[in-house]
Structure formats: structure tokens, C-alpha cells
Amino acid sequence: MFKKLSLKGSSNTNNQIKSSLQRNIKNSILAQYPKLKDIEEDVFPKKVPIVQVKCQNHINLVLINNEVLFFNEREGPYYPTLRFLHKYPNILPHVQVDKGAIKFVLQGANIMCRGLTSPGAKMEVDLPVDAIVAVMAEGKDHASAIGVMKMSTNDIRTINNDIGINNIHYLGDSLYMSPNLE
């Protein structure tokens, strides 16, 4: 999604949004990620405005204190950024890929089922289709990517063919490389 996105000069509007829209964004994010309720004041401090930046390809960035915390495409679900996920790693369920898949994940490739079912990979939680997950790498502590399940974990185990997770945001893409929008 962010392989060729250039944040400098690509943003059409960078506006502080109305308080009603700020509430809607905040409530939508909190409904989507219920584990954020405990740290709501840290993530959404009072008296700090939420800024929405509209970029090319209908991508919206949500900034707080000039730091990109969430993004979405069109009116779709909000995804946390990897930097935010590294601060709060338990807001998403984790899946782990084997060592052979790491270099492909870091290049932005979608995660194949075989990279999720081979030795070294883990899918401990049963997840449905379209669940947002943190993609961990074997032997690493932090998430390498954020993805969306294209198949359920049961289907991945039984079919074991084709793409299992769509890679949305990964270490080294343009969003990760420019955490602050200036």
C-alpha cells in the first residue's frame, strides 16, 4: 500500500478536523481495538487535536502530536502504524512467519500460507477472514508487518496454498520511514 507513497508533496489536505469528526474517528478506533480502552488517555490525550491528512490513492492518515498513529483507505477500517504497534504490541493478534518468509515480507510481499504453516511459524489464535493482524518474524521481538487475513486460520491450515495474509504496512515502507509529517 505504501511502497510508492511519497508523503512529501503527496498530501492534498492537512487539516485539523471538527470536534465531531474527531470524536467519530476516536470512537471508531476504540471500537475496532477494544484493548486501547485502558490506554485511551495516552493515545488520545485531551486538549490535543486530531489531524487528518488526506493523501493520494484515498489514504487518510490520523495524526496526534504530529505523529502518524493510524491510517485507513477510503472509508475502510483503521490500521495502526508499525511504530504505534511497537509501543503497544498487544492491541492486535499475532501470527508468526518462518525465517524463509522474512525477506519477502520486508519487501512488501503478501504472506503465503506455506510461510504460516511451516516449522518456525505460529498461528495460535483462530482468526476469521478480514481480521487485522501483526505479522511477527521468527526469532524477532517486534512486528515486521501489519496485514489483513485473506483466509481464516483454519483454512490456512487445511488448504495450505495461495495467499493467507495481505501485507498492508511493513518495516521499510514509506509510511514507516517518515513517522512525522512536517
Image (cartoon, rainbow, N blue to C red):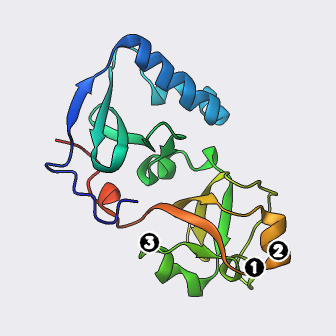
SS type, badge 2: helix
Residue 145 visible here: no
Q: Earlier in the sequence, mark 1 or mark 3?
A: 3
Which amino acid is tagged 3?
Gly
In whole angstroms, how far apart are the C-alphas of marks 1 and 2? 6 Å
Mark 3 Cα-neighbour bin, 10 Å: few <14, some 14–19, many ≥20:
many
13 up-or-down from 176: above or below: above
Q: Earlier in the sequence, mark 3 or mark 2?
A: 3
Q: Would you name the residue on which mark 3 appears? A: 108
Q: Residue at x 73, y 64 (%)?
A: 151
Q: Residue at x 22, y 51 (%)?
A: 7
Look at the numbered discs 1 and 2 and tell me whether their residues touch, using CB distance below 8 Å: yes
Callout count: 3
Q: Would you name the residue on which mark 1 appears? A: 117
Where is residue 90 drawn, in percent x and y?
Answer: 63, 47
33 up-or-down from 5: above or below: above
Which amino acid is tagged 1?
Thr
Q: Quadrant of the N terminus?
A: bottom left
Where is residue 6 drawn, in percent x and y?
Answer: 22, 57
Where is residue 144 drawn, in percent x and y?
Answer: 50, 66
Q: Quadrant of the C terminus?
A: top left
Where is residue 123 drawn, in percent x and y?
Answer: 76, 67
Residue 91 visible here: yes
